[in-house]
């Protein structure tokens, strides 16, 4: 099938590409979604072609709520969830409605580069906070928040990727989440958790979400089908207290365009009526765990001393720190002719002077038989540059 051979946007041909956090395209459930599409067409074709209810397709909301309540032992109600055109839509909408132009946003340093872009589009003032292996450093965050509030510029929002963070692969500990929630309550800022990687857990229990820990108060959470099914579906969800969901349902864009993507929502409501999504998630966990293990053992085997990396317990990213003698830009320039590309650290920081000795490796899109060779070539290049 030719459509399976074309490359997704941003992926270069004949390269081992650690650059983009794209899902493994061999995991897309073509046949199951084809069956669901035909069934949705038969049973609700008219609704698929109309503007949809502002909150989103009703059966889909119910199915996602059931899935989350089952998986995390939550007590979400129908009124807590709204369908979105992906997590990206949620970040944009929350920033627009709850921060406003020029409002202050706290964010992890480093963080997902495209959200920095969205916040900049809104004219937000960005306040990066450094991280350690347990998540954002609370003392640093407290200092920033105290300073901002004494200047009369209290931040409105903290944007976080709590599980298997993009780009570091780190998961914020439960204690850290609770401390951050305390600070948020004291200084009255919203916590926005972008939890698109939660389902891709390899081992151990994940801490409860900020939403669960706060019983919903002051927290918004976004999820997506992009990482556990396919990004081309452009479908995700927002979880919040009913008044917050109400504000989002009543905003201009939702009023004008109706609920997100009724066409694909009807197909997914059909698909989620079986246990196929859960089975797909289990297969993905195995798939990405295998890739993570191959990548970690290749790093152990080939990387020279002085290079360090995170060990994620889920998700699709590894974060490397180079020795001070090797800048990431030099590494990028020298590894490209060898056929290896990756994302350089500075793109994940608000200040592009940060992250010059860091790189992100996404292992989800690199075939298992190329992972080892890609890392061997990178390691060889680091050695050459260190001489
Ligand atoms: C943290 C994070 N949020 C959101 C997205 C994009 O999600 P969506 O496709 O649902 O808009 C990504 C994709 O890489 C991501 O890493």
Image (spheres, rainbow, N blue to C red):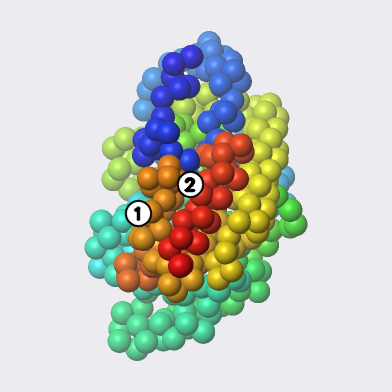
Can residue 90 be seen from the camera position used here?
no
Q: Earlier in the sequence, mark 2 or mark 1?
A: 2
Question: Where residue 127 sits in the image (x, y, percent)?
Answer: 36, 73
Residue 273 picture location, percent across and down: 65, 27
Tag 1 residue:
333
Residue 159 vs 195, above or below: the answer is: below
304 with respect to 244 (left or right): right
Residue found at the very far front of the displayed protein? 387
Q: Identify which residue, 325 or 101, lies in the foreground.
A: 325
The quadrant where residue 162 appears: bottom right
Residue extending farthest to the right is 204
Location of residue 338 in the rendering, given as x and y in whole percent from the top left corner: 43, 45
The label nearer to you, 2 versus 1, is: 1
Q: CA distance from mark 2 to mark 1?
A: 15 Å
Q: Quadrant of the C terminus?
A: bottom left
For the view shown, which residue lies furthest in the top direction?
42
Q: Nearer the viewer, residue 234 or 168?
A: 168
Image-based side of 21 in relation to 35, left or right: left
Q: Nearer the viewer, residue 74 or 275?
A: 275
Residue occupied by mark 2: 18
Residue 244, numbered circle? none
From the viewer's side, name the closer residue of 153 and 354: 354
Residue depicted at 50% across the width and 67% down the height = 321
Element marked by disc 2 = loop
- Label 2 near ligand 1 (CB < 8 Å): no
């Amino acid at each position: 099938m030719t459509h399976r051979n074309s490359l997704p946007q941003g992926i270069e041909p004949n390269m081992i590409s650690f650059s983009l956090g794209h899902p493994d395209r061999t995991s897309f459930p073509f046949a199951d979604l084809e069956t669901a599409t035909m069934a949705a067409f038969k049973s609700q074709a008219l609704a698929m072609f109309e503007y949809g209810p502002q909150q989103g397709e009703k059966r889909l909301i119910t199915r996602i709520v059931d899935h989350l309540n089952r998986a995390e032992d939550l007590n979400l109600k129908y009124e807590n969830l709204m369908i979105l055109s992906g997590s990206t839509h949620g970040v944009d909408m929350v920033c627009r409605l709850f921060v406003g132009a020029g409002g202050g946003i706290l964010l992890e340093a480093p963080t997902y580069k495209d959200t920095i872009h969205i916040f900049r589009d809104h004219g937000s003032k960005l306040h990066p906070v450094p991280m350690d292996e347990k998540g954002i450093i609370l003392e640093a965050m407290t200092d920033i928040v105290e300073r901002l509030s004494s200047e009369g510029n209290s931040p409105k929002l903290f944007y976080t990727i709590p599980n298997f963070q993009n780009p570091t692969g780190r998961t914020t500990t439960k204690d850290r989440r609770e401390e951050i929630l305390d600070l948020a309550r004291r200084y009255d800022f919203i916590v926005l958790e972008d939890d698109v990687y939660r389902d891709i857990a390899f081992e151990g229990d994940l801490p409860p979400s900020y939403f669960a820990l706060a019983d919903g108060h002051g927290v918004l959470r976004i999820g997506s089908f992009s990482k556990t099914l396919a990004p081309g579906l452009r479908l995700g969800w927002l979880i919040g207290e009913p008044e917050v969901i109400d504000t989002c349902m009543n905003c201009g864009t939702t009023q004008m365009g109706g609920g997100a993507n009724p066409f694909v929502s009807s197909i997914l409501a059909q698909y989620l009526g079986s246990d196929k999504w859960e089975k797909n998630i289990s297969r993905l966990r195995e798939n990405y765990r295998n890739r993570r293990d191959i990548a970690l053992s290749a790093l152990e085997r080939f990387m020279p001393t002085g290079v360090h990396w995170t060990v994620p317990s889920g998700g699709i990213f590894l974060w490397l720190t180079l020795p001070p003698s090797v800048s990431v830009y030099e590494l990028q320039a020298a590894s490209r002719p060898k056929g290896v590309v990756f994302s350089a650290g500075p793109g994940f920081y608000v200040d592009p002077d940060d992250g010059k000795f860091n790189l992100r490796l996404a292992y989800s899109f690199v075939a298992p038989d190329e992972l080892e060779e890609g890392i061997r070539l990178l390691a060889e290049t680091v050695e050459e540059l260190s001489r």
